[in-house]
Each structure stands twice: as C-alpha cells, then as structure tokens.
Image: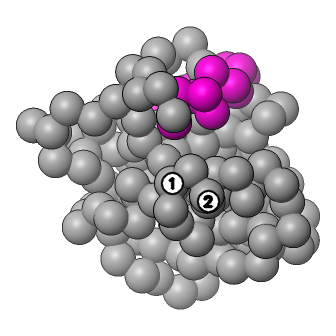
Amino acid sequence: MKVLLQIVTDWRDPVSWAIRFSTRSWASHAEFVLRNGTTFGARCSGVRLRAYEPRPYSHVEWFSAPEIEYAYEWARTQAGKKYDFSAIAGIATNRNWRDQSRWFCSELIAASFEQVGAPLLNPETKVWRITPRDLLLSTQIWPAHF
C-alpha cells in the first residue's frame, strides 16, 4: 500500500483563508492519501476514510516520511472521532492539542507519527498547537510524487 501525506489549500475557501492568515502559511489542510486517491483524516464531518473525490484545491503537495504506513494504521484507529472545532480557536489561544477524543487535521497527523515512535516535530519542544504549517516545517517529511 502506498500512503502519502497530502497538504493542501483552497484559495477561494474563507475557512482556508483564515487558517492560512493566522498561521502565515500557504497550507490549510493535511490528511493521508492512498494511491487510489482515497483520503483519511479529520474534516468538519469527523475523522474518517473518504472515497476519491476530485477536489478543487488551489495547491496540493505530497510528502512521505519514515513510518508513514504505521502512522496511517494508527490514525485509522481514530475513525469515527469528532472534528476538533475548539482547535480552530486554539490556534489563537494556544490550547493544548493532545485531546484524543477529537481531532483537527494536523493534530491527527502529528499524533499518528508520535504514536508509532516517529514524531514529526522535536518531542522535547513543548508545542501547544499543530497546524498544517507546522507539518511543513518538519525535517521528517520530504516531497513525494504519486
């Protein structure tokens, strides 16, 4: 199975704009993507696997990382959990992101890699939020192609 990390944005979406503005980044969403285009991640409808659907993203980049398939498998154990709407406010208020009862897209990605012993961020750094921009700053991911 080929799994990649997909980091995207949609220039026309106001929520995407707000995320990009508050994080000073081009990126507004992150999720796992499989070779067939199926995605897995946290969106407003919750954490789940989604069939391929052509999305009108303005910008898409794919990345790979050590242990990505194991991280994906751990993420799948979180299916059915709710979206972490408080994380949106937490971007501004520095809310601790490690509430495993609900997930924001980049929180789920970061937690997945931590759970399999391959953290994307320096584990000694106390981080109170994880955004798509933070994932882009990781030295543990590298560009990939489908």
Q: Could you tell me if residue 97 is visible in this image?
A: no
Q: Residues within 10 Å of mark 1 (few under 14, many from 20)?
A: some
Residue, x 34% and y 44% (percent of image)? 113
* Residue 141: percent from left, percent from top: 33, 68
Above or below for 22 versus 85: below
Q: How is the model colour-coded?
A: one colour
Measured along the vertical axis of the image, is residue 73 above or below residue 55?
above
Quarter of the picture holding the N terminus: bottom right
Is residue 44 visible from the viewing direction of this image? yes
Amino acid at dot 1: Thr
Q: Which residue is mark 2?
A: 20
Q: Which residue is rendered at x = 56% and y = 13% of the image?
A: 101
Three-letter amino acid code of the residue under disc 2: Arg
Mark 2 closeness class: few <14, some 14–19, many ≥20 residues within 10 Å: many
Which span of residues is magenta-colored? Answer: 72-91
Q: Is residue 27 left or right of residue 120?
A: right
- Kindly identify which residue carries mark 1: 23
Residue 58: % across, % down: 77, 78
Q: CA distance from mark 1 to mark 2?
A: 5 Å
Q: Is residue 134 magenta?
A: no
Q: Secondary structure at mark 2?
A: helix
User: Would residue 64 appear left or right of 39 to someone viewing this image?
Assistant: left
**Lateral position of residue 67 relative to residue 35, left or right:** left
